[in-house]
Structure formats: structure tokens, C-alpha cells
């Protein structure tokens, strides 16, 4: 009896890479991982030797009631934010996968915007809508209801849901788009109900995707810096990242900052390591999910629920974006653009973003290519390296380099290089999530044929991987520039009169109560970041994939 052919799964796709190519890709991955690990961990390792700073014990710090409260609030707000983002994002993803309507592709791009929007700009939009003078506050007053403060835990939760609910929805949609067409045909032929379709077809996808999605959102919320800095509302709503920043900027207590950094890394690592074992990298597509052709039986009540849920989500996402547009247009944009301070900050931000995006793409491509030719522990090591910035966030890396470089003189001399490298590392987790599923897919489709034809090395990259990676690379590059343009983590420590980026200038204007100028700068920064994404979607990526 003939043996049944083994399906070509993501792991079996490794066999489609020749031995010489696999070895070369693994060496590239090790080199990229070494650069990421070195930049993130080296300053923390060398700090006691170079500076002689006695590091306080993280365990001893927990004896301080204030720091115990900071740790507790960090984990509590991250847990609540993740719970809300998942509880809202999963039904939204299911609704979007069931609905078919003109403009669906445009709507999916709307759910990509919060990830491309600078965090500080998004926070300003949320304050404009939900703040004391916002539309929501006025509606509550008219209804005779008390108006809750946007500052503190409520504001942090609203902001985290704004940024992470679309992320969960897109990750789940990416998993649903991978359901075989035969499954939907069988569901239609058997006239499965909405509940039966969910239990038999959709629930297995959720089991694969929810673990990585929830882990990613929890780490993003636990390492949130800018949102908590703007919306925290005092000592009762402070996270470890803000405490590290305060230890250096206000108290200048290096020993405390290093101990808090180690505590932060340890806490987040406990979350990351288990989550790496959940699901597959192939399920966590970060790009635009294609629409599944479904044949299940429609339900009028269910369809109305899906439409209502989608409309509420769109309104929630559009409100801060429209608030940014409305308040920004009221500013004197011409005067702001002609302001030498804005021009210098814009040129500096674009230069940093271009260099950081190029370096981040180089590292991400090396890690993604290596992952396509690696299995087992090596694949886990590459995944950990690509997600290291989630464990050792930018404010921790910046604090390590800030203290280490003080042993060599004026820190300002090294600031541009550190900011570029820090932003490049920040790009890596997102770029690898865009590139890795595409590389896995192209290996499944063309890997064995390429090996049979003897394609290897540069020839294989040119004829097999490059055509499939052009659009994802353009999207990852534009997204990397947008992330770098809006980052405040490293610049918050290294920023000075000679290193002012657009987010740092925006923070200065907000701090000096020049709210009109801040709103104009926020609008210009948002348009710049969103323009990059649209350019990648429509121009650089070639023919668009149907949605």
C-alpha cells in the first residue's frame, strides 16, 4: 500500500531550501540577531563595569510600597487593556469577515491607521474627543451625567483600545483569510447555522491566533510609555517605563533606573517566552487580509449585529482622527510650516526615519530569511530576537546607552546614532510579522520547483522571493518610517536643543501650553505618516492584492 503524501506545511517548507542556501540564510539570521541582541543587552551588561554604578536589587525595590504600586498598575492596566482589545477586536474581525460591501478594502486600511499613527498624535486626538472640553464630555453634560476624567486609568484604557483593538482584528482576519475554501463550501452545503459555523470553522482559527495576538497586545501595553506619560494622571497611574524616565530625567538616580530596567525586562520576558509557543508565525499576518469567499447561511439578526458593531468601531476610530484634522486645520499651518524650528525638526525626523527604516528592514529581512530555513530551537531563537524590543523596550535601551555613554564624555555626541539604531530595532517586530508569512507562502508555492531548477543564492532571491516580497517590503518600509517618525521613547532621553524631532517638538509645545501650535504639528505629523503608508500601498508595492 502506497504511503500517503505528506502535506507541505510551513515546517515542511523548510525542505524546499537547499542546504547551501539554508546555511547562508542561517548565518544572515545569526548576524542580524547578534546586532539586535548586542544593541539591546550590551549596555545593561557593561553598565556596572564602565560606570561603577552599584545596581540596586530589583527584589529590594519591591519593598518600596510606591514601586510595588507602580508594578501592580503596570500589569493591571496591561491586563485590562488586553482584555478589552481582545473582547472587542475578535467580534469585530468575525463581523468584517462575514460582511461584504463596497469599500471593504478602504475600511480595512482604516484599521491599519492606528498602528501607523504616531502615539503622541493619537493621544492628543483622544484628549480632544474624550477630554473635559471634548464632544463626549459635552454630550454627557447635556444628558445630565457626570463626566469621567480622561486622565488616569480610564484614559489609558481608552487609548490602548484605540491602538490595539484594530491590531487584534487584523491578526484574527489574517488567520481567517487562511481558512481553505473547501471548509466554507462544506459549511454552505451543510447549511450550518451561525453558531455551528463559528464552532467548527472559526473557533479553531481563534485558538491559533488569539494566543500570539493577546501576548503581543499585553507586551505593547505593559511597555507603553508615551500614552502613560501624557494620560497617566499622576503617581497613582505610573508604569515602570515612566518611572525609569523619571529616575533619569528628574531624579537622576542611575542605580534606581537600572534596577527598574532589569525589573521591567524580567516581567515582560515572563510574558513573552510562553507566548512564543502559541500559534504559528504564518498565522500572524500583519498585512491586508484577503476576503474569504464564504458560503455559510446568512442570518438577518446576525447581519444587523455585525453592521452595528462595525459602525460603532468605525465611529470610535474615526472620532480621534477627525478631531486631529478639525483642530489642526484651525491652527495657522502656514506659519508653523515656515517656522525654522518645525523645518529643522521635520528634516531631522525624516533623516532619522529613513536611516532607521533601512536598517530595520535589513535586520528584519535577515531574520525572516533565516526563519524560512530554520526549525526547532533555532527558529525560537530568531523569533525571540525579532521580538526583543518588546522585552527590552526603547526607553530601557535608551536608559542603558544614556548611562553607559556618559563614561565616554558628552552623551549628545552619540545621540543621533543611538536614536537611529533604537528606532531601527523598534521597526523589527512589525517588519518581521509582515515579511515572514510572505516568505513562508512563497516557499510553499515555489520552493520545490526552485530547488528542482537549481536556483540558489542571489538567483533564487531575484526570481523567487523578490517578486513576492516587493509589496510587503514597501509596506514594511513605509510602516517602519511612520513608526520611527512618531517614536518618542529614545528621543525623550537623548533629545536636546540640537536633537529635536517632530514628536519632541510636539511634546514641547504641549508642555508650554501652546495647544494651537501643538494641534497643527500633530496634524502635519499625522499626514506625513499616513502619506507614507498610502504611498507604499498604491505606488511602491506594484499591483495591489485584492481584498
Image: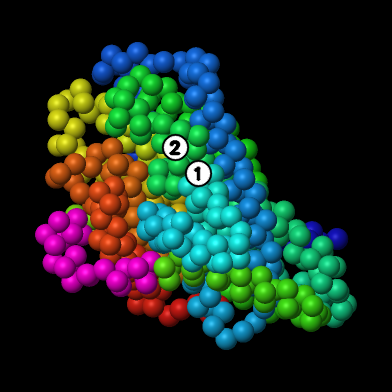
In the displayed structure, 70 sits above or below 539; it is above
Disc on the earlier residue, 2 or 1: 1
| Residue 225 position in % (x across, y down) | 42, 43
- Residue 73 at x, y percent in the picture: 55, 35
Q: Can residue 328 be seen in this view?
A: yes
Residue at 79% in and 81% down: 300
Name the residue rendered at 14%, 26% in the picture: 409
Residue position for label 2: 234
Residue 26's disc number: none
408 up-or-down from 9: above or below: above
The answer to whether marks 2 and 1 mark residues whose Cβ atoms lie closer than 8 Å is yes
The verdict on residue 34 being magenta is no
Residue closest to the eye, 309 or 323: 323
Check disc 1 and report its element: helix, strand or loop: loop
Q: Please identify the quadrant where the N terminus is shown.
A: bottom right
What count of labels does the image hold? 2
| 27 left or right, relative to 108 | left
Give the magenta-colored segment's residue range. Answer: 324-347
Amino acid at each position: 500500500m502506497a504511503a500517503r503524501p505528506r502535506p507541505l506545511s510551513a515546517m515542511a517548507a523548510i525542505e524546499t531550501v537547499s542546504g547551501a542556501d539554508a546555511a547562508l540564510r542561517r548565518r544572515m539570521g545569526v548576524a542580524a540577531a547578534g546586532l539586535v541582541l548586542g544593541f539591546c543587552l550590551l549596555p545593561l551588561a557593561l553598565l556596572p563595569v564602565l560606570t561603577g554604578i552599584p545596581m540596586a536589587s530589583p527584589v529590594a525595590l519591591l519593598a518600596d510600597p510606591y514601586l510595588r504600586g507602580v508594578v501592580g498598575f503596570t500589569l493591571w492596566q496591561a491586563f485590562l487593556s488586553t482584555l478589552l482589545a481582545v473582547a472587542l477586536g475578535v467580534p469585530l474581525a468575525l463581523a468584517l469577515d462575514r460582511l461584504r460591501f463596497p469599500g471593504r478594502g478602504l475600511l480595512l486600511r482604516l484599521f491599519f491607521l492606528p498602528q501607523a499613527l504616531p502615539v503622541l498624535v493619537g493621544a492628543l486626538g483622544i484628549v480632544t474627543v474624550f477630554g473635559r472640553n471634548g464632544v463626549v464630555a459635552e454630550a454627557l453634560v447635556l444628558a445630565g451625567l457626570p463626566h469621567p476624567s480622561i486622565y488616569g486609568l480610564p484614559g489609558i484604557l481608552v487609548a490602548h483600545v484605540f491602538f490595539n483593538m484594530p491590531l487584534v482584528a487584523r491578526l484574527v482576519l489574517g488567520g481567517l483569510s487562511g481558512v481553505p475554501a473547501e471548509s466554507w463550501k462544506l459549511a454552505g452545503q451543510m447549511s450550518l447555522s451561525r453558531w455551528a459555523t463559528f464552532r467548527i470553522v472559526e473557533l479553531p482559527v481563534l485558538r491559533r491566533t488569539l494566543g500570539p495576538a493577546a501576548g503581543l497586545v499585553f507586551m505593547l501595553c505593559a511597555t507603553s510609555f508615551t500614552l502613560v506619560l501624557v494620560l497617566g494622571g499622576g503617581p497613582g497611574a505610573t508604569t515602570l517605563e515612566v518611572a525609569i524616565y523619571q529616575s533619569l530625567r528628574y531624579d537622576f538616580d542611575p542605580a534606581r533606573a537600572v534596577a527598574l530596567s532589569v525589573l521591567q525586562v524580567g516581567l515582560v520576558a515572563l510574558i513573552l517566552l510562553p507566548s512564543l509557543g502559541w500559534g504559528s508565525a504564518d498565522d500572524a499576518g500583519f498585512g491586508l487580509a484577503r476576503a474569504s469567499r464564504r458560503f455559510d447561511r446568512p442570518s438577518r439578526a446576525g447581519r444587523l449585529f455585525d453592521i452595528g458593531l462595525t459602525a460603532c468601531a468605525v465611529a470610535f476610530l474615526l472620532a480621534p482622527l477627525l478631531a486631529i484634522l478639525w483642530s489642526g486645520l484651525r491652527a495657522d499651518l502656514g506659519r508653523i510650516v515656515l517656522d525654522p524650528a518645525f523645518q529643522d525638526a521635520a528634516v531631522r525626523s525624516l533623516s532619522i526615519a529613513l536611516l532607521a527604516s533601512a536598517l530595520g528592514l535589513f535586520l528584519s529581512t535577515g531574520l525572516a530569511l533565516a526563519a524560512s530555513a530554520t526549525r526547532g530551537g533555532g527558529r525560537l531563537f530568531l523569533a525571540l530576537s525579532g521580538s526583543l524590543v518588546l522585552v527590552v523596550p526603547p526607553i530601557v535601551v535608551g536608559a542603558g546607552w544614556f548611562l553607559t555613554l556618559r563614561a565616554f564624555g558628552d552623551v549628545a555626541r552619540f545621540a543621533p546614532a543611538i536614536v537611529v539604531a533604537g528606532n531601527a530595532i523598534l521597526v523589527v517586530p512589525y517588519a518581521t510579522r509582515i515579511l515572514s508569512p510572505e516568505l513562508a507562502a512563497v516557499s510553499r508555492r515555489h520552493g520545490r520547483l526552485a530547488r528542482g531548477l537549481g536556483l540558489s543564492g542571489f538567483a533564487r532571491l531575484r526570481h523567487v522571493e523578490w517578486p513576492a516580497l516587493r509589496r510587503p517590503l514597501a509596506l514594511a518600509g513605509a510602516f517602519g518610517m511612520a513608526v520611527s517618525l512618531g517614536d518618542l521613547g529614545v528621543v525623550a532621553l537623548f533629545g536636546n536643543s540640537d536633537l529635536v524631532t517632530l514628536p519632541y517638538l510636539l511634546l514641547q509645545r504641549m508642555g508650554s501650553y501652546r495647544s494651537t501650535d501643538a494641534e497643527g504639528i500633530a496634524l502635519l505629523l499625522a499626514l506625513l505618516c499616513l502619506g507614507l503608508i498610502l504611498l507604499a500601498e498604491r505606488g511602491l508595492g506594484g499591483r495591489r492584492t485584492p481584498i
